Image: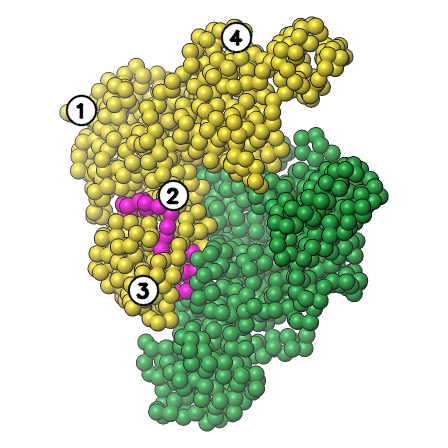
Chain colours: A yellow, B green
Amino acid sequence: MTTTTSQSADIARLLSPRRIAVVGASDDIVRIRGRVLHLLLKRGYTGEVFPVTPSRAEVQGLKAYPRVGDVPGGVDLALVAVPANLVLGVLEDCAAAKVGAAVIFSSGFAEEGGEMAEVQAQMVALSRRTGLRIIGPNAMGFYNILDRTAATFSPAAEIAPVDAPVPAQGVAVVAQSGGLGFALYNRGVRRSLPFTHVVATGNEADLEALDFADALLDDPRVAQLMMFIEGVKNGDKLIPVARKAARLGKPVIMAKVGRSPAAQRAAASHTASLTGSDAAYDAIFDRYGVIRADDQDEMIDIAAAFSVGSLPRGRRVAIVTSSGGSGSWMADAIEQAGLTVPLLSEDLQARIRPLIPSYGATQNPVDITAQGLSAFDTVIEALADSTEADAVVIVAPLGSVGAVEAFSPEALKAAIARAGKPVVFYSYTPPAPEVAALMAGLGTTIFTTLTGCAAALAHLVRYREAVERLGRAGPETAAAPDARAALAGLPADACLLTEVQAKRLLATAGIPVTEEELVTGADAAVAAAARLGGRVALKLMSPQLPHKTDAGAVLLNIEGEAAIRDGYARLTGPVAAALPGIDIHGVLVQRMAAPGVEMIAGVTVDPDFGPLVMVGAGGIFVEILKDVAVSPAPVDRAEALRMIGRLKSVALLEGARGRPRADIEALADLVVRLSDLALATADRVQEIDVNPIFVRPDGVVAVDALARLAPAAAETPRPLAAAGE
Amino acid sequence: MTTTTSQSADIARLLSPRRIAVVGASDDIVRIRGRVLHLLLKRGYTGEVFPVTPSRAEVQGLKAYPRVGDVPGGVDLALVAVPANLVLGVLEDCAAAKVGAAVIFSSGFAEEGGEMAEVQAQMVALSRRTGLRIIGPNAMGFYNILDRTAATFSPAAEIAPVDAPVPAQGVAVVAQSGGLGFALYNRGVRRSLPFTHVVATGNEADLEALDFADALLDDPRVAQLMMFIEGVKNGDKLIPVARKAARLGKPVIMAKVGRSPAAQRAAASHTASLTGSDAAYDAIFDRYGVIRADDQDEMIDIAAAFSVGSLPRGRRVAIVTSSGGSGSWMADAIEQAGLTVPLLSEDLQARIRPLIPSYGATQNPVDITAQGLSAFDTVIEALADSTEADAVVIVAPLGSVGAVEAFSPEALKAAIARAGKPVVFYSYTPPAPEVAALMAGLGTTIFTTLTGCAAALAHLVRYREAVERLGRAGPETAAAPDARAALAGLPADACLLTEVQAKRLLATAGIPVTEEELVTGADAAVAAAARLGGRVALKLMSPQLPHKTDAGAVLLNIEGEAAIRDGYARLTGPVAAALPGIDIHGVLVQRMAAPGVEMIAGVTVDPDFGPLVMVGAGGIFVEILKDVAVSPAPVDRAEALRMIGRLKSVALLEGARGRPRADIEALADLVVRLSDLALATADRVQEIDVNPIFVRPDGVVAVDALARLAPAAAETPRPLAAAGE
């Protein structure tokens, strides 16, 4: 924790330097070397700036110094824009001069490969050795808008007027791609979104996107984070940052590239440093309320909705429109996003009716008609005062500032302020940029697409739900089963466990499994079947036979001594003979389980994110629905129930078509125990699949299971080494 | 057909008038009365304009006439902007003066209700009596951009420069909401989309949106239609227009409001004139390649993609990017839209490699890097020449015209022209409006969102597939079964048919049904069971008992005389006694069908659109998947197979988890026969539900069925009368 806090402080200092050296500064403001200095000076930086260049006495009107160490009084931050082969020497100078941090704009390191990748590794070593923190190389730098510090060459730093007021709170952008990070800023400024910082992390030799995210969350002026990542270098940083953001109530709007095979291929080809499957990211984002977005404008829309400052208490949206058709179209979008547009009560309709023309509508959408535009504020007030809507959307043609001014902005502003719930606008005529600024001033925002507006409101609702849920959750430590008990008797080498071994492991965690005995003779099989009672299944057990059914190694519904002897002979005779070289542990005699709803559950230990717990539909639903929910361990009962509740097949468990309700709570308990087991054994157990689980009205039973172990001595392998380590 | 052709010609004349009277014209160009004349004059109309007003000798510098009849030489079109109570008199004048058509801007008719709705009805009567065609009332009018005729008061008519060149071909907008219609135009112009017409139809007393759509499709200069509708007044016009558009290869991009209960409630409250369920619209749109969109910008994106002029031959997209992260994000969007980003062949990669910097990527996305911008045209050329991509997307920062010009636009234009496949752009920095114009000039378009770009390309692919499919389909006449045979023996009154009646109806169409006999005594039941053989089901038959199972009126797997007598006694005794007042036809003795994959099929006769045929998953899938496909009759075999192929549960039919493949062709045949039956009996049969159907490897059987009849004499009811009729 001390490390994190100290790193957060390092980064805070780095982002708010008082004395900056620009190494390689030149007078040519078209080239990066001159442009960085130019932007720093031009964008209102109030600290001291020192050009560093061996060849000139003065650059852009400032006295220049040959080396960083020559700058009198020390330097907080060095901005480095020199050819790649000179960078290491500059960093040595910086370290010697006790410079706190360096931004390296220069490119041609790890991305170039070969010996330049080695130079980047040396940079990392230098940073570790000397404590010099590094952004980049190949970075576009950062723009601290709050402190007017443009440590970047991005043209986007010039989008807003130099004297634009600094917001009290706003959005910080952290991006692994500088182009996209600054493009988000560029687009957001046009929507009058308040920004605090833009940070582009480049090759992340030292500081990573999540390091900046962590530090920026500590800044009270940062109300939201926008992130663009292709992946994180150190998976173990992700969950802590996501949890911290949720705890602070600061939304993280995340663009995570890599859903598609093509994007994964690209990431694999241009960097070896990124970790984690896309499904793991999704599970973590979902669990901790991180909002994943698929497009820049979607990110801007979501941030704009959050910037309004209040969250809906529920899913009910009231629509106020000056055009029937547009209001209805918005209703379609709102309901498609998973929110509702409820019929207003007769009382509320009666309050609204006198405010609008006779041919308007009061049901919701409230159609004030084109002739009733002046009624917007009074109608909003009526809706804001009521308990019948959790958010209000106003649909009108607001292409120009004049159009908004026709609605008496002061009255609107007052109504919005009193509302205590989000009141947002959508204009079907394309709004001019000044309209966005005007709306921001009124304490609201204006959307230009129906779908963007509706989706953003839905994110507000889901975010509130996630934060409340996480607030209710207990401490993130699991009441793990005795790990020694769980691991006792497991083979020491990396291997697949047999069904019976896997189920004994499950049983140590308190998971109900089928009644069964492993036998090694026909007589023993008969005796076991007699003890178990009823019909049995016979299964050939071998750690080299994970797919028993495909090999004909499972016989079901066997009854009577003769059939048991026959079955035993068949499994150990012709079936085994057809599987040469496998190590046979015996035959499992298993009491046939009473059927129930078929479900599956499992654990995969992600090398970076740790155990991910899965529950899903079994049987034919597996192929057709791909109906699974995944969440990082530890999963408590509430989380397990939420996972099950998100399955489409929950309808089966709830008793579709007049069948009895299955014991969903018992299934949730199984998932929790699986999560606890995974945490207790994460150094050994790499994967557990419980398939099928029968969920009956009176409980659950694990009918079959598989588990895969890592070798006892080795640590969890990290298949992809972080670059530069 | 003569009527349609003549109406299309009427509308073509109406939209290209040579002599226009503006009735109610004034000098006050802020008010509608003056504004209409002002826009007409200002926007370059080249025909003759005659202000008509009793109070003035001259308006806006033109000689004014007291009445329409006073205009020398006649009038093609009257634009009417007088108070509502004077409109009918003006229309009488117009009719007397043989004016061809009138646009009525005045509002306060059907939308006002009461006696003004009656005035609108009189307008309709006048139109029918005199042949005067009417747009409106309460219409925003139209803007014929090709002929520079702004017959509207919409401020959007002034968006483009007056001297903007007229496109050779473009997009026509037809909207029931003038605000949205002109907003689409407004947004599209900013994207440099070429427009031909905007028509806002208002209350549709006479001419409806689909009438304009039909006429505009006849205009060779109209390449695409955009429509905004809340619903159509006459459902029987929809399918012909959709088919015509597909036949002509002119995409129809459709905003149809009313997916949500709230929008349906709004439509019901503000008009009684719109017809058809939203699901029926979806089925028709899907069948005939009409592209449904959920947002204005989505419509613009789709139209922009079509405006490029070529359709992809398949789903493979090559991405060329100057930024790795953005290229990957685009790949995610493309694959999420249902297209693919395939790995390029080694040969093609070898051709591309020398064109780009060494640290670029060639797999696809092709990353030419920020340093390789000048290679865009040569890389595009390499991809265009290859057979490995059906479309090319270029991802780059193209915020300014300068940024595009850095890529040598002439070389790009040539490469795009040679490509023979869509080559489109996405800029992650927000593109300035002039960039859109520049791109249009290069024969391409630029998208501002990843998701919009990907979705639009996917629409191009699906549209091509739909048009090709419709081109392959036979004539739209069904080989209907003998309707008399089908209807023979059906009750004359409106009623529900029993299972046995419904299945006899199915059998007349050649649909395989279970073997069964209706009996009225225990002895007969025993005898029937003996003839059928094996185990049987016993079902109490009554037309008042559609949900037999819920009433305990179905006994399954009955075997042996005693059990049959018991069952018969139970159904006709206690079960029947618990259902007082129902009319019992007897007990159905049914041979138990061998199980198969449970599916359902059915027909609903939409009062406006005719029979809609449905096929879907049965059993538990009904609740969980809501997995159904709907298509308007007639459904031929190819269409039935397409419907089945779109079901998620097609995996069950195809033999998931090692089960045998079910007879999908036999299920398709059943669907075709159901469609034929529905067409042959559409005057009587309102609804058929076949549930379940067992689909086995060797055929299908309808196991249970329900049907609902309209009374024999009455015509199909039209529950909602079209307003003004």
- Asked if both marks, 1 and 3, belong to the same chain, the answer given is yes
Q: Position of residue B588 (x, y in %)?
A: 74, 48
Q: Which residue is mark 3?
A: A350
Which segment did they paint magenta?
Answer: A306-331
Front-lying residue, B599 or B401: B599
| Residue found at the far right of this picture | B531
Q: Give the residue drawn at x 62%, y 47%.
A: B551
Front label number (4 vs 2): 4
Q: To which residue does mark 2 refer?
A: A459
Q: Nearer the viewer, mark 4 or mark 3?
A: 3
Residue B304, numbered label: none
Q: Is residue A27 above or below residue A533?
A: below
Instruction: Residue A74: give its label.
Output: 1
| A530 lies left or right of A717 | right
Quick one: label 1 or label 4, which is nearer the N terminus? Answer: 1
Q: Nearer the viewer, residue A534 or B448?
A: A534
Q: Amino acid at mark 1?
A: Gly
Chain letter of disc 1 in the image: A
Tag 4: residue type? Leu
Disc with the residue nearer the chain's start (4 vs 2): 2
Label 1: which secondary element: loop
The span from disc 1 to disc 2 (Cα, nearest Å) is 47 Å
In the image, residue A701 lies at what x, y percent?
55, 22
How far apart are labels 1 and 4 at the CA level? 60 Å
Q: Is residue B621 above or below residue B163?
A: above
**Tag 3: amino acid:** Ala
Residue bearing mark 4: A490
